[in-house]
Amino acid sequence: MGDAKFFRAMSYFNLVVNYGGVPLVVNQVTTAQKNYVRATEEQVYSQIISDLTDALSAVPEDPAQYGRVSKDAVRHLLSKVYLTRAYKSYAASDDFSNAAKLAKIVIANHPLVPSFSSLVSINNQRNSEVVFAYLFGTNSVSRGWGNSKHMMYKFRFYDYPGLSRTVQGLGPMPTPFYYSLFDDADQRAEATFSRVLYATKEATTTLNGETVNIQVGDTAMYFPKVAWTDAQRAAVPYKVINPDEYFTSDGITNVHYPIFRKFDDPDVAFTQPDQPSNGERDMVVMRSGEAYLIAAEAYLGMNDKATAAGYLTTLRARAGLTTPVSPDDVNLDFILDERARELTGEVNRWMDLKRTGKLIERALAHNPHVAFNHAIDEHDLLRPIPQTEIDNSGGSITQNPGYE
């Protein structure tokens, strides 16, 4: 029952953040029904917190079987729910403090892995920092479609000479602003994405008007953090793509950018996007690295910037950034930038930006496509209710504003 209420709460949390108030179905449906009226957001949050409170008392502190729901998994989700509700007009006065209190327990029970590269290593998936993960594994029957995160944030790199077709790209690319967030000393950059792609097969190509013989292990592509001059690019026998060219077609691919390695699953064969991805890695859903950021944001919400700075300093120190964070520097943008560096691909960025009231502002400031088309406004803070749901309810479920 505790497991069931945990997953129901997680599902309703995703629903309410994306769609606003939705029908609350908390009892078994035994007859055909159409009359499903949307509850208010406030009612949905109350149900989520009720379910998680029940789950916290029902699930074990330390499950005997890895991957089962633990009290810390419940605490982590509940801390994020409190943190999200704290920004609402119907927030409880202790939402920020409850979020901080729960995050602190998770942090105490799940020590940070010493290095970020070790944290994301495929050989160290089940480590002290993991609070909850979906498990896939090598059994094709129980694995289902498989973990697809090894396909995230990759362009068609294999269309370039010397690079093999090992994994298909999936979904959108990160913005150039994202890549600019990392200080040179930040070890998370190298562990998260690669600025150098090395040849995996021999090839012959023409570059800068000259024939180049590529050997396995040679540099095939390079994405400098600071733009190279034309002279520097002409002097090397490999493709160099500057930061301002990520969106510029070079006749081979329309977009190209430092490729993600954080979720690499090298033993998994290439598959097309419409085929099972077959990824075998665990998909980490909750870890204490995020709990540090939840705690920092909660303390900021309580106007305790000094304590917030302490959590940020500890987390950044693991990444090699040893200068303490000054309380004067702590604000929502600082925390959101830190979440981007620490949690790319692990949590829902849209939800983070919406929670903090920064979605429209930051999308217009940092996403070139959004800014060019001014493709976001207040109605985008909620997703459209699928028309099939409205039709199936006979119209008792209403559409969100701006999508009628």
Image (cartoon, rainbow, N blue to C red):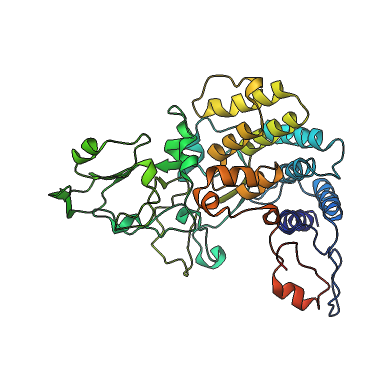
Furthest toward the front, the residue is 373
Location of the C terminus by quadrant is: bottom right
Location of the N terminus by quadrant is: bottom right
Residue that appears at 75% across and 33% down: 100
Q: Position of residue 63 (x, y in %)?
A: 70, 47
Q: Position of residue 395 (x, y in %)?
A: 81, 75
Residue that appears at 19% across and 53% down: 202
Question: Is residue 131 or residue 367 the one in the foreground?
Answer: 367
Inspect this view and state whether residue 296 appears. Answer: yes
Residue that appears at 74% across and 73% down: 389
Residue that appears at 49% across and 55% down: 172
On the picture, is 43 further left or further right than 328? right
Furthest toward the bottom, the residue is 32
Residue 361, placed above or below residue 307: below
Inspect this view and state whether residue 111 appears. Answer: no
Quadrant housing residue 313: top right
Question: Is residue 394 or residue 111 the one in the foreground?
Answer: 394
Quadrant housing residue 78: top right
